[in-house]
Image (cartoon, helix red, strand yellow):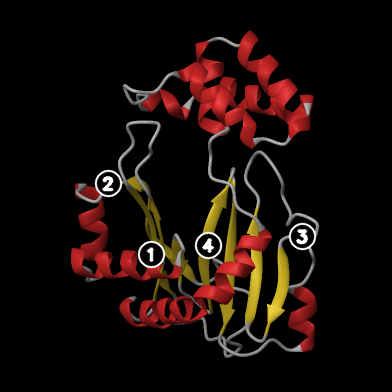
């Protein structure tokens, strides 16, 4: 656990404090927020976090307050959401494939307004152009950056920002398409989607990690089932569906054990 705290403090000193870009909402008491947030952590983690908070300067305290209340999810919730929202998730996948223009791959995520910081709803969107010279007939081949040209990569844009409007214009989208995608994601209880040789749908963030569904165009063969069932990053679920966990810079790097 000490290693986790040291890693956090390393991030503070090396990369600075993201929370400094924003202000806490006026009705937020930092100490009260910490006392409530610490209860979200496993009991064995709390002692080191409490010590780090008490002994830290304002910069360290603010970083801990940014980290601890981050959203939490699980493999169990990932599966339960698929089973309860399968129809909406498949509809999201199919509609999105039609909305994205031909020969483009678009990765988009909606982050809701923060209840703690003065952070409005934000949108991250990355656009790639497919190289037509890359002719791959295997629809289930792992998607890579080979043959892709980055058109734009933007994080944490507001819905009214000039940058976002320029990105939308580059792929022929209007705010109508943007709102349609947002609603489809809400209906599926998901937060992001990326098209391509396989469609990757982000279910939820958990700490600095993220849970996904990967949809292949055809049911996986035995070789692919082995490749996408390593028990860490991938778990083969059924037919053409793979569960994925992407670890962040801090925290778990694999699916939790049952």
Between disc 3 and disc 4, the foreground one is 4
Helix, strand or loop at label 1? It is helix
Q: Dot 3, crowdedness within 10 Å: few (<14), some or many (≥20)? A: some
Q: CA distance from mark 1 to mark 4?
A: 10 Å
Numbered disc 3: secondary structure: loop
| Left or right of 170 in this view: 75 | right
Mark 3 or mark 1, which is nearer to you? 1
Residue at 59%, 43% in the rendered image: 207
Residue bearing the label numbered 2: 158
Say whether disc 3 or disc 2 marks the residue closer to the N-terminus: 2
Depth order, front residue of 207/6: 207
The residue under label 3 is: 232
Q: What residue does disc 4 label?
A: 203
Which image quarter: residue 191? Answer: bottom left
Q: Could you give the CA–CA distance between mark 3 and mark 2, rounded to whole angstroms?
A: 34 Å
Which numbered tag is attached to residue 196?
Answer: none
For marks 3 and 1, the one nearer the N-term is: 1
- Above or below residue 222? Residue 179 is above
- Using the numbered discs, state the Cα–Cα distance from disc 3 to disc 1 in whole angstroms: 27 Å
Q: Tell me which numbered mark, 1 or 4, is placed earlier along the sequence.
A: 1
Residue 225 image-quadrant placement: bottom right
**Is the residue marked by circle 1 packed among few (<14), some (14-19), or many (20+) residues within 10 Å?**
some
On the image, the x and y values in percent for residue 213 come to 58, 70
Q: If you read the primary sequence from the N terminus, does the residue marked by circle 3 or circle 4 appear first?
A: 4
Q: Is residue 6 visible?
A: no
1 or 2: tag closer to the N-terminus: 2
Q: Can you give x and y, in whole percent of width and height, for residue 133 in the image? A: 47, 82
Q: Which residue is mark 1?
A: 186
Image coordinates of residue 13 in percent, x first then y, are: 58, 20
Q: CA distance from mark 2 to mark 4?
A: 21 Å
Q: x and y percent of residue 102 in the render?
A: 35, 81
């Amino acid at each position: 656990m000490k290693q986790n705290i040291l890693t956090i403090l390393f991030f503070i000193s090396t990369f600075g404090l993201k929370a400094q870009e924003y202000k806490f909402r006026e009705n937020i008491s930092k100490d009260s927020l910490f006392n409530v947030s610490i209860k979200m952590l496993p009991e064995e983690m709390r002692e080191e976090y409490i010590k780090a908070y008490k002994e830290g300067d304002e910069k360290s305290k603010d970083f801990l307050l940014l980290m601890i209340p981050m959203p939490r999810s699980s493999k169990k919730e990932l599966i339960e959401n698929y089973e309860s929202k399968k129809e909406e998730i498949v509809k999201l996948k199919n509609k999105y494939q039609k909305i994205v223009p031909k020969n483009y791959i678009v990765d988009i995520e909606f982050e809701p307004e923060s209840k703690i910081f003065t952070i409005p709803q934000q949108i991250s969107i990355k656009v790639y152009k497919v190289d037509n010279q890359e002719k791959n007939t295997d629809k289930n081949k792992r998607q890579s950056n080979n043959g892709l040209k980055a058109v734009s990569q933007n994080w944490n844009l507001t819905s009214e920002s000039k940058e976002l409007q320029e990105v939308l214009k580059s792929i022929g989208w209007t705010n109508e398409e943007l709102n349609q995608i947002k609603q489809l994601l809400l209906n599926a209880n998901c937060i992001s989607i990326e098209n391509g040789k396989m469609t990757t749908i982000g279910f939820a963030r958990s700490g600095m990690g993220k849970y996904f569904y990967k949809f292949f165009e055809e049911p996986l063969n035995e070789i692919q089932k082995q490749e996408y069932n390593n028990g860490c990053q991938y778990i083969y679920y059924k037919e053409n569906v793979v569960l994925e966990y992407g670890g962040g810079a801090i925290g778990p790097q694999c699916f939790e054990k049952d």
